[in-house]
Amino acid sequence: MNENRVLVIDDEPQIHRFLKPALETGGYEVERANNASEGLRLASLRPPAAILLDLGLPDQDGQDTLLKLRAITHAPILVVSARDKDEEKVQALDAGADDYVEKPFALTELLARLRACLRRALVQDGVVQPFEREGLRVDLRTRRVWVEGAELVLTPREYDLLAALVRNAGRVITHAQLLRLVWGPRHTEDVQYLRVHISHLRQKIGEAGAKLIRTEAGIGYRLMAE
């Protein structure tokens, strides 16, 4: 795998013309695929560090392509699509996408999301650096949390919820994914229960919680990493 190669699967020539120089300026090597078949072939032949995937492909629905990509690669997949319905986003994230950006998009946001995906992919063998931002510090190795230097007391469930967000920092996690991670597979429909716990967690963390734990309406939550 080339640690700097990004595979862009999109049938719009203007997207390739727009993204290629921006990605190259960011230090990435760019590989282009104009349809699903070509993207799957390239992902298998030369495994990339990350994949940018459009859902509106001419030869195959992008959701099906996503499932096939996830079967052959562990590389982060960032969906970049004009489809803006919540159910489309949830379906893509539940199928294995690491994040979702709507077209048209701000280039700075796309690159930040890509960097966040690649950082998560570098975490191996359980070695996780403490998360630190806006005065919040979370050490997953010791299960300890601090806000502005003062240690915070959380319930086990609150800590598990925060830890799930930290492990996926920068990435949107669907309601069902969070519920499955923290409460188990029998609770994936208990969205209101999750909202209550997120509210309590934000209140305990204080100003940092309000800034860092972002609600993705109709989809889930994201812990801001940049």
Image (tube, rainbow, N blue to C red):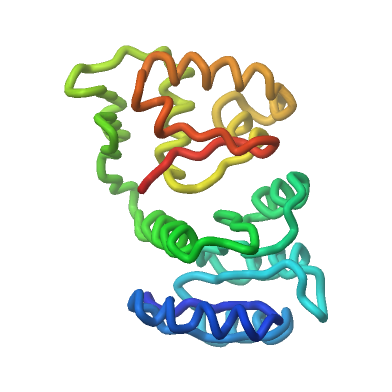
Vertical comparison of 198 with 35: above or below: above
> x%, y% of residue 78?
56, 62
The residue nearer to you, when weighing 106 against 83, is 106
Q: Residue furthest left?
A: 149
Count of all numbered marks drawn on residues in the image = 0
Residue under the image location 43 percent in, 77 percent down: 22
Quadrant of the image occupied by residue 202: top left
The residue nearer to you, when weighing 191 against 133, is 133
Vertical comparison of 95 with 35: above or below: above
> x%, y% of residue 83?
75, 58
Regarding residue 131, the answer to whether it shows in the image is yes
Judge from the rendering whether residue 58 lies leftward or rightward of residue 217; answer left or right.
right
Residue under the image location 70 percent in, 36 percent down: 218
Q: Looking at the rendering, in which quadrant would you find the N terminus?
A: bottom left
The residue nearer to you, when weighing 48 against 11, is 11
Quadrant of the image occupied by residue 175: top right
Residue under the image location 30 percent in, 45 percent down: 128
> x%, y% of residue 184?
63, 28
Judge from the rendering whether residue 136 lies leftward or rightward of residue 24; answer left or right.
left
> x%, y% of residue 119?
36, 58
Residue under the image location 74 percent in, 26 percent down: 189
Regarding residue 1, the answer to whether it shows in the image is no
